[in-house]
Amino acid sequence: MKPLAWKFYFWVILAFDMVSFVIPYERRIWEIAETGFFVVALCGLFGFCWERKIIAKLFWQLFFAAFLCWILVYFTFGRSQAIQSSLSAVPLPTLVIVIIAVVVLHVPLFWGLFLYAFKSKVWE
């Protein structure tokens, strides 16, 4: 049984990401792909938190690597135009705080996916 903190984190990250998905703005192919990746990642986090087999271990190992690559590509190329236009509208200290908050909030997601894909006893 996973600690209650992981389950609490699952619901927090689900709520946080659902709010970001429903904010109305023009969605480009990058945002649509990001939504797909996050839905799959949330499924993996659910499997990790509730110790359920979802699909197969190899799938989650490959997905973890693909998800990391996707995040690097997305934030390097997909968001570059949006970030550049936001820089002029948002004060730098606010922007830094938002970026740090988003990163800190999502680090456990990556850690949970890593543990689920490579260390979880659910696959034994």
Image (tube, rainbow, N blue to C red):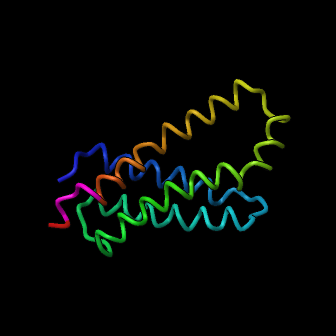
Which residue is drawn at the image coordinates 78% and 27% (left, top)?
91
Q: Residue furthest top?
A: 93
Find out whether residue 91 is within the magenta segment.
no
The picture quadrant where one finds residue 63 is bottom left
The picture quadrant where one finds residue 86 is top right
Q: Residue furthest bottom?
A: 55
Q: Horizontally, is 120 left or right of 80 in the view?
A: left
Image location (x, y in percent) of residue 114 = 34, 53
The picture quadrant where one finds residue 119 is bottom left
Q: Nearer the viewer, residue 7 or 38?
A: 38
Image location (x, y in percent) of residue 39 = 50, 65
Most common secondary structure along the magenta stretch: helix
Q: Horizontally, is 52 left or right of 98 in the view?
A: left
Q: How many marks can you see? A: 0
Residue range highlighted in magenta: 118-122
Q: Horizontally, is 18 left or right of 110 in the view?
A: right
